[in-house]
Image: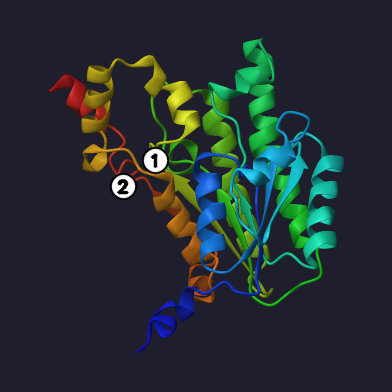
């Protein structure tokens, strides 16, 4: 068996993927992974906040395009997906990764009540409208809709987890189940991935940057497998779901937390030991 034969089930040549929130963290890792395996990749930057030219130049890759997106605006959502179709002729794979967290939502609002509304608007309603727009496209063979939720809300509940954050991620998991139920006879597969503590700018802003080196080391030791998840690890799961081999998993809500979803009290156990 040649190297090409071994890679064939994971080959994405001829496929067009859109990754929302592709300028950092899990999104950036997804862009790089899908591109490496042959896909033409479109990704989004935050409309009127991030510079599209700088965003695409930062990758230094061909078969790549950037599209501004504001998940609070259905007009922006429709314009984004239309621009991907205009540029690449089709859209086979949608990775709904863009979201805000408890720390990053402060860039959109100062008042906690407004932040809660913004969290639900971007994470839940924005993802809903992205899914609806994608599913309204002319049906292609073996399309993939991959939502990124979170272990907090998508799988289980953690004491102290911000309510609006958990609610928004739970909504994404429910949305995935509902859409999967409605598309069992269509040429599209629908999934959600629920990452645990992943080494992203979002986690750094909410947690890691507030810790001393000693506290950070203790935090990581308390996690499953005694470490953070790396964005590339989540991107590898996205890659698998983007291939034909994932069809049997249509409707799956995937716990990608290295066991934190199965044992959510793990950190408390270590703290009380």
Residue 220 numbered tag: none
Q: Quadrant of the N terminus?
A: bottom left
Q: Quadrant of residue 53?
A: top right
Q: How many numbered marks does the figure carry?
A: 2
Q: How is the image coloured?
A: rainbow
Up-down: is 5 above or below 201? Answer: below
Q: Is residue 93 above or below residue 219?
A: below
Crowding near the residue tagged with mark 1, few <14, some 14–19, many ≥20 C-alpha atoms within 10 Å: many
Label 2, residues with CA under 10 Å away: few <14, some 14-19, many ≥20:
some
Q: Residue at x 39, y 40 (%)?
A: 196
On the image, the x and y values in percent for residue 200 come to 45, 35
Q: For this rendering, which residue is in front, 241 or 260?
A: 241
Q: Identify which residue is drawn at 46% across, 46% down.
A: 194
Q: Are marks 1 and 2 in contact (CB under 8 Å)?
A: yes
Q: Residue at x 79, y 53 (%)?
A: 81
118 left or right of 258?
right
From mark 1 to mark 2, how far is it between C-alphas? Answer: 7 Å
**Which residue is tagged 1?**
196
Tell me the element at label 2.
loop
Relative to residue 100, is residue 131 depicted above or below? below
Query: Which residue is situated farthest in the top direction here?
Result: 111
Q: Position of residue 215 (x, y in %)?
A: 25, 18
Q: Position of residue 184 (x, y in %)?
A: 63, 71
Query: Which residue carries the number 2 mark?
Result: 258
* Nearer the observer, 186 or 226: 226
Along the viewing direction, whichever of 104 and 189 lies nearer the viewer: 104
């Amino acid at each position: 068996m040649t190297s090409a034969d071994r890679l064939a089930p994971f080959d994405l040549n001829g496929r067009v993927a859109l990754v929302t929130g592709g300028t950092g963290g899990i999104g950036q890792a997804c862009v790089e992974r899908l591109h490496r395996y042959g896909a033409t990749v479109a990704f989004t930057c935050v409309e009127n906040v991030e510079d599209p030219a700088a965003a695409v130049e930062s990758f230094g890759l061909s078969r790549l395009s950037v599209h501004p997106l504001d998940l609070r605006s259905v007009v922006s959502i429709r314009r984004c997906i239309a621009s991907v179709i205009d540029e690449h002729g089709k859209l086979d794979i949608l990775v709904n990764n863009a979201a805000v967290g408890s720390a990053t939502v402060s860039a959109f609002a100062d008042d906690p009540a407004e932040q809660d509304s913004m969290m639900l608007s971007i994470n839940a309603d924005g993802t809903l409208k992205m899914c609806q727009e994608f599913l309204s496209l002319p049906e292609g063979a073996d399309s993939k809709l991959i939502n990124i939720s979170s272990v907090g809300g998508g799988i289980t509940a953690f004491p102290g987890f911000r309510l609006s954050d958990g609610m928004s991620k739970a909504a994404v998991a429910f949305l995935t189940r509902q859409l999967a139920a409605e598309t069992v006879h269509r040429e599209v597969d629908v999934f959600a991935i629920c990452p645990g503590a992943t080494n992203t700018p979002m986690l750094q802003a909410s947690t890691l940057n507030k810790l001393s080196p000693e506290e950070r080391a203790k935090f990581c030791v308390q996690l499953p497998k005694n470490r953070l998840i790396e964005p590339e690890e989540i991107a590898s799961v996205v890659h698998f779901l983007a291939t034909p081999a994932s069809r049997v998993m249509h409707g799956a809500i995937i716990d990608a937390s290295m066991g934190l979803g199965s044992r959510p009290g793990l950190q408390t156990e270590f703290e009380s030991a």
